[in-house]
Image: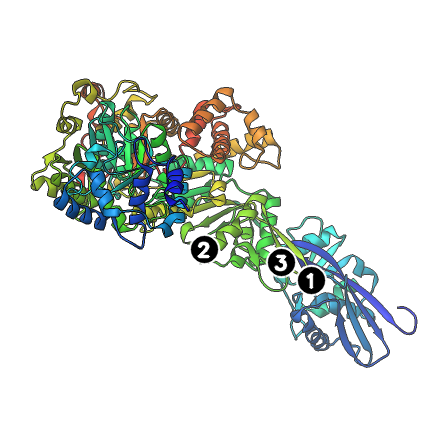
């Protein structure tokens, strides 16, 4: 509605740059000129095709399409690359407003997202949860979405989510003649213990290591022959992780939604995610990537949960290297020519490996057929920066018949999980929210150790010829052991126990 | 150009006391690839010795002659390499060259030139403890037991420096006053086997402890199979007795034993598990007349005149029955000795709270009571009969794991 017969209407939506929502103004101008619709503002291919979908949908629904005029739709900010079919609905709304079929005024408050079918039906697009959160943050009062996406969008507090079936219903809602179907948020699922620790026979050391890993979020390395239960143990560790806070669960759901890894009507799960990518996963599959706006990878999909990497030593070096920085920072940064995308990846990593190329080194049931120098070379791949991030190393041996037939002999998950929660609470109280035993500065860590403990540690590092990094690592683990025992200061015995979670050094045989 | 003076200047600091730099340079020039091999050198020397007789130095001089002037720079460079590595060199017949090894040369095979780092063993009794790289916990345990007792009795231990049995023997020998000698299968300066040869590794500790790393090869020569096999004759040549702990059918330790027989040295073999492939070498030796070695006493008796009695008991300087280990844990380890016990099994058998057990294990490892390998944990020292007797009377048999094999072989349990 401006000079020279031009009509301008604006609707609002959200473009996602990774997990970051970005408010987008969809401007539509009608005016004299060659008839047709031109879409500007860095649309990608799927978005450019949106023009045809929108035109057909509007006509199919019996609404007026401005056929005789030149129509320009601009997506602002114009330099932000936009992708996907979620802009179908805001474009249609802008056109309908420009042609006077819906009022302009409400569009500041009522935002929209969704894909249109040629018949004018609305369809859900992946990632509606972060879009809804972004809309609320950018000042939207309500959000129009497809019915199937409504439960997910409604998980966002402080935003009225309206489920609309088709374009005609959109017009009714915007004219105030109908209020659509108010969406009810998806239900919240509280985790049930699936894999119980009580199923683990014998293996007291492994149980203890799992408890420590869960309590301190220490990355864990499991080494053992095939079939000794490494995956079984990793799943038990998953069961030990405390349920997510709703905020964290929303973050997880947002990432999964973006990667199209959850159905929009799925319940919000407080179960920490468990991801088990195969060792042939690509770098892009693991850390995220892809053309256009990079999508989250397995690392981010395991955010706030557990990432299990089996066959660590069969995994190509590039993949291991790609893991390092994200593990340290807790986020993946994917830099492309036009943009930089960040995805969080606060994961607990469990890496499993065979102890040697044939897998049977140290196995009581089968002889290892590897030459010692090959074992040495195999293991040397483990060394270096990635291994330094794995605080706990555990050798898993297969259990024997005697144990297999015996009665369950250990505590169930519920008991252990209780201690894990208490230990995490103690650590949170000491460090504050933004640090844990795994990543707090060493100086602060040292301050909580008894002098005797530091002396013991120094002696042990000297006596067992360990590296300086092993010193820090043992101190972190010792801190968690003390937390589990309810001790405010680290005892020498805590340090000594922490030092036991290391792989046997092959270098010195006796 | 005065080649002789240049060589004398370069080799002066490298050769051992009492060796002639020119003689060393001459032998070296002869040995330089691509000319001739140590085998060819010995064969020529044997011919010369048979024809003309004479002391080794004279024989050597007759064979090698004067160095080719064209090789001058290479020789000087070699001397520098050795010098930077802290290596000493001598040729057979020199006062610093081990007399045992030189005996019988050139009819008996020995390297014409020997390069070593550290201190060569003095003229005291020496045993060679040899065996497979792919050793079991039993093999490394026995090797460590024998070597430590020998070292405690002042007997030197020589071996091949490989992973497995050799390394167990070397490392255990460091616990006592006796020195230990490694015979390398490659030249000095090559990091092989990597875990031992890297800075601060087993080899460095051996040199610090008064032992030696010995090689007949030039600094760049790699551990190809021929070099590694040839090293076995030096191991036997430096010893007064050879004991084979574990080895497969084609084990290099059979070569060592063969050389020992040729030199008239006693050969012992440690009986092993008849089902284990690693027992075939010692069992074959036993069937061919080697003496069974059932403990340090047999070994020390074979080198003759070595002290027995007290020296055979685990050395007294490290407490035998604590290191902070709870008695239940100790009982399991004693019953299994010298086999290692996997950590999980130890935790289960000893019925200790896991945290306490792990702390105790670390403490015991730090003070040297326990050793850790890929197969599990093992007491470093042999438990004395008194310790065994005491444990038998105080702990229930089941706890001590005597009725089952604590190494966890399931088929042995039924």
Circle 2 or circle 1, nearest the eye: 2
Which residue corresponds to mark 3?
Answer: A127
Give whichever of A8, A278 is nearer the camera. Answer: A278
Packing grade of label 1 (10 A; few <14, some 14-19, many >=20) is many
Give whichever of B33, A388 is nearer the camera. Answer: B33
Which residue corresponds to mark 1?
Answer: A113
User: Disc number at residue A316?
Assistant: 2
Residue at 58% from the left image edge and 45% from the top image edge: A330
Q: Kindly identify which chain the residue marked by label 3 belongs to.
A: A
User: Disc number at residue B95?
Assistant: none
Circle 3 or circle 2, nearest the eye: 2
Labels 1, 3: one chain: yes
Q: Position of residue B295 (x, y in %)?
A: 16, 29
Quadrant containing the N terminus of chain A is bottom right
Labels 2, 1: one chain: yes
Secondary structure type for disc 2: loop
Labelled pair 1, 3 in contact (Cβ < 8 Å):
no
Residue at 83% from the left image edge and 64% from the top image edge: A104
Give whichever of A266, A284 is nearer the camera. Answer: A284
Based on the displayed image, in which of its 4 quarters is residue B286 positioned? top left
Report whether A340 appears left or right of A198. right
Residue B307 seen in the current view: yes
Secondary structure type for disc 1: loop
Secondary structure type for disc 3: loop
Report whether B10 appears left or right of A418. left
User: With respect to residue B273, does A45 lie above or below?
Assistant: below
Spot the residue most to the right: A3
User: With respect to residue A142, does B57 lie above or below?
Assistant: above
Give whichever of B247, B221 is nearer the camera. Answer: B221
């Amino acid at each position: 509605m401006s000079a020279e017969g031009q009509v301008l209407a604006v609707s609002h939506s959200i473009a996602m740059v990774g997990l970051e929502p970005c408010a987008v103004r969809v401007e539509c101008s009608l005016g004299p000129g060659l008839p047709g619709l031109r879409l500007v503002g860095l649309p990608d291919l799927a978005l450019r095709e949106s023009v045809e979908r929108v035109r057909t949908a509007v006509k199919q629904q019996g609404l007026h399409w401005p056929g005789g005029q030149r129509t320009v739709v601009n997506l602002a900010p114009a330099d932000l690359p936009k992708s996907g079919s979620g802009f179908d609905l805001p474009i249609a709304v802008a056109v309908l407003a420009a042609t006077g079929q819906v009022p302009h005024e409400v569009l500041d408050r009522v935002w929209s997202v969704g894909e249109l079918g040629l018949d004018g039906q609305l369809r859900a697009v992946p990632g509606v949860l972060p879009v809804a959160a972004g809309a609320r943050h950018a000042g939207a009062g309500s959000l129009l979405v497809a019915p199937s996406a409504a439960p997910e969008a409604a998980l966002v507090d402080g935003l009225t989510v309206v489920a609309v079936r088709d374009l005609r219903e959109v017009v009714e809602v915007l004219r105030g003649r109908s209020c659509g179907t108010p969406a009810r948020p998806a239900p919240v699922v509280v985790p049930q213990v699936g894999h119980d620790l009580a199923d683990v026979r014998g293996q007291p050391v492994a149980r203890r290591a799992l408890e420590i890993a869960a309590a301190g979020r220490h990355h864990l390395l499991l080494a053992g022959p095939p079939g000794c239960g490494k995956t079984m143990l990793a799943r038990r560790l998953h069961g030990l992780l405390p349920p997510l806070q709703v905020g964290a669960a929303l973050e997880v759901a947002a990432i999964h939604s973006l990667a199209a890894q959850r159905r929009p009507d799925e319940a919000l799960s407080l179960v920490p995610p468990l991801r088990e990518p195969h060792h042939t996963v690509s770098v892009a599959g693991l850390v995220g990537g892809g053309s256009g706006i990079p999508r989250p990878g397995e690392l981010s999909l395991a955010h706030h949960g557990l990432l299990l990497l089996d066959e660590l030593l069969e995994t190509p070096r590039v993949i291991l290297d790609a893991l390092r920085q994200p593990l340290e920072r807790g986020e993946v940064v994917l830099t492309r020519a036009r943009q930089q995308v960040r995805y969080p990846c606060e994961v607990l990593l469990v890496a499993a490996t065979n102890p040697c190329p044939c897998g049977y080194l140290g196995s009581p049931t089968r002889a290892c057929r590897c030459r010692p120098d090959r074992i040495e070379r195999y293991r040397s791949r483990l060394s270096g920066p990635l291994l330094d991030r794995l605080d706990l190393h555990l050798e898993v041996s297969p259990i024997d018949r005697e144990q297999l037939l015996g009665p369950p002999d250990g505590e169930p998950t519920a008991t252990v999980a209780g201690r894990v929660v208490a230990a995490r609470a103690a650590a949170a109280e000491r460090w504050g929210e933004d640090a844990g035993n795994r990543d707090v500065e060493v100086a602060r860590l040292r301050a909580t150790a008894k002098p005797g403990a530091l002396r013991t540690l120094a002696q042990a590092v000297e006596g067992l010829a360990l590296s300086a990094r092993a010193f820090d690592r043992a101190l972190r683990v010792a801190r968690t052991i003390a937390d589990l025992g309810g001790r405010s200061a680290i005892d020498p015995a805590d340090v000594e126990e922490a030092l036991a979670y290391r792989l046997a050094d092959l270098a010195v045989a006796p | 150009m005065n080649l002789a003076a240049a060589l004398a200047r370069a080799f002066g600091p490298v050769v051992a006391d009492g060796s002639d730099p020119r003689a060393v340079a001459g032998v070296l020039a002869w040995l330089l690839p691509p000319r001739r091999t140590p085998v060819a050198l010995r064969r020529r020397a044997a011919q010369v010795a048979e024809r003309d007789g004479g002391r080794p130095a004279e024989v050597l001089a007759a064979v090698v002659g004067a160095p080719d002037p064209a090789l001058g720079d290479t020789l000087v460079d070699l001397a520098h390499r050795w010098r930077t590595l802290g290596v000493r060199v001598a040729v057979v017949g020199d006062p610093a060259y081990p007399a045992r090894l030189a005996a019988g040369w050139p009819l008996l095979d020995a390297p014409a030139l020997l390069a070593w780092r550290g201190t060569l063993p003095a003229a005291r009794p020496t045993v060679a403890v040899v065996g497979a790289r792919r050793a079991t916990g039993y093999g490394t345990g026995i090797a460590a037991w024998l070597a430590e007792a020998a070292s405690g009795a002042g007997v030197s231990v020589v071996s091949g420096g490989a992973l497995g049995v050799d390394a167990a023997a070397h490392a255990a020998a460091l616990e006592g006053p006796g020195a230990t000698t490694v015979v390398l299968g490659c030249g000095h300066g090559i990091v092989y086997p990597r875990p031992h040869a890297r800075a601060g590794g087993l080899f460095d500790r051996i040199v610090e402890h008064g032992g030696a790393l010995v090689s007949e090869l030039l600094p760049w020569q790699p551990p190809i199979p021929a070099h590694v096999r040839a090293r076995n004759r030096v191991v036997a040549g430096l010893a007064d007795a050879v004991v084979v702990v574990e080895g497969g059918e084609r084990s290099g330790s059979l070569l060592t034993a063969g050389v020992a027989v040729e030199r008239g040295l006693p050969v012992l073999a440690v009986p092993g598990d008849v089902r284990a492939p690693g027992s075939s070498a010692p069992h074959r030796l036993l069937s061919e007349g080697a003496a069974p070695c059932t403990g340090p006493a047999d070994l020390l008796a074979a080198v003759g005149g070595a002290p027995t009695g007290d020296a055979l008991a685990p050395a007294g300087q490290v407490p035998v029955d604590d290191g902070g280990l709870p008695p239940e844990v100790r009982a399991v380890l004693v019953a299994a000795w010298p086999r290692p016990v996997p950590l999980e099994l130890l935790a289960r058998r000893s019925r200790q709270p896991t945290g306490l057990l792990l702390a105790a294990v670390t403490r015991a490892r730090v003070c040297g009571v326990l050793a850790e390998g890929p197969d599990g944990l093992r007491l470093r020292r042999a438990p004395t009969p008194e310790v065994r007797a005491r444990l038998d009377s105080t702990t229930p048999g089941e706890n001590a794991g005597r009725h089952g094999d604590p190494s966890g072989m399931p088929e042995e349990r039924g």
